[in-house]
């Protein structure tokens, strides 16, 4: 009988730079009266990252032509374009919840809310 190989897992998660992957998505639905409603989304809508550690956030544009965005409370901004990967180098010193907001789709009235929550802990 072959014993399973022991794989050391403790500690390796923080040994390398953490990469978080996100995409842009779209929710669509048709009302009873035939009217179409839709909302663009960051997916996943909530991410958790450690404070005072470098983290790479990769956002791939799937739905929507482009999404100009900023992260509230920081000077981080950019644009996610369809078929392209946008990579952000994040390093939050302060704990808290930061909102990643698309300027084109910030609320229900603009095919949103396209807001993701970055929980820094
Ligand atoms: Cu958008």
Image: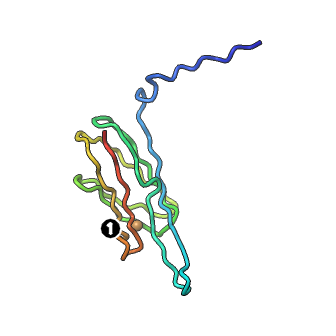
Position of 89 compared to 74: left or right?
A: right
Tell which of 102 and 75 is nearer to you.
102
Identify the image quadrant of the N terminus.
top right
Q: Looking at the picture, does residue 119 appear above or below residue 107?
A: above
The location of residue 13, given as percent across then percent down, is 45, 29
Q: Residue furthest right?
A: 1
Position of 44 compared to 6: left or right?
A: left
The location of residue 51, given as percent across then percent down, is 29, 37
Mark 1 residue's CB less than 8 Å from ligand 1: yes
Residue lying at 48% horizontally and 56% vertically, measured from the top left: 23
Q: Looking at the picture, does residue 71 appear above or below residue 2?
A: below
Q: Quadrant of residue 67?
A: bottom left
Residue lying at 29% horizontally and 41% vertically, measured from the top left: 91
Ligand 1 quadrant assignment? bottom left
Identify the image quadrant of the C terminus.
top left
The location of residue 102, given as percent across then percent down, is 35, 64
Q: Quadrant of residue 49?
A: top left
Tell which of 110 and 33 is nearer to you.
33
The location of residue 4, given as percent across then percent down, is 67, 18
Residue lying at 64% horizontally and 17% vertically, measured from the top left: 5
Position of 91 compared to 46: left or right?
A: left
Q: How many marks?
A: 1
- Determine whether the residue tagged by mark 1 lies in a helix, strand or loop: loop
Q: Residue furthest bottom?
A: 33
Residue lying at 54% horizontally and 74% vertically, measured from the top left: 29
Determine which residue is flagged by label 1: 103
Tell which of 29 and 101 is nearer to you.
29
């Amino acid at each position: 009988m072959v014993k399973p190989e022991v794989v050391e897992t403790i500690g390796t998660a923080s040994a390398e730079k953490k990469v978080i992957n996100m995409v842009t998505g779209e929710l669509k639905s048709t009302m009873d009266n035939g009217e179409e409603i839709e909302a663009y989304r960051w997916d996943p809508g909530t991410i958790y990252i450690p404070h005072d550690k470098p983290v790479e956030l990769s956002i791939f544009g799937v739905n929507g032509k482009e999404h100009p965005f900023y992260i509230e409370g920081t000077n981080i901004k950019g644009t996610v374009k369809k078929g392209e990967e946008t990579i952000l180098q994040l390093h939050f010193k302060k704990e808290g919840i930061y909102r990643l907001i698309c300027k084109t789709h910030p609320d229900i009235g603009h095919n949103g809310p396209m807001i993701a929550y970055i929980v820094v802990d």
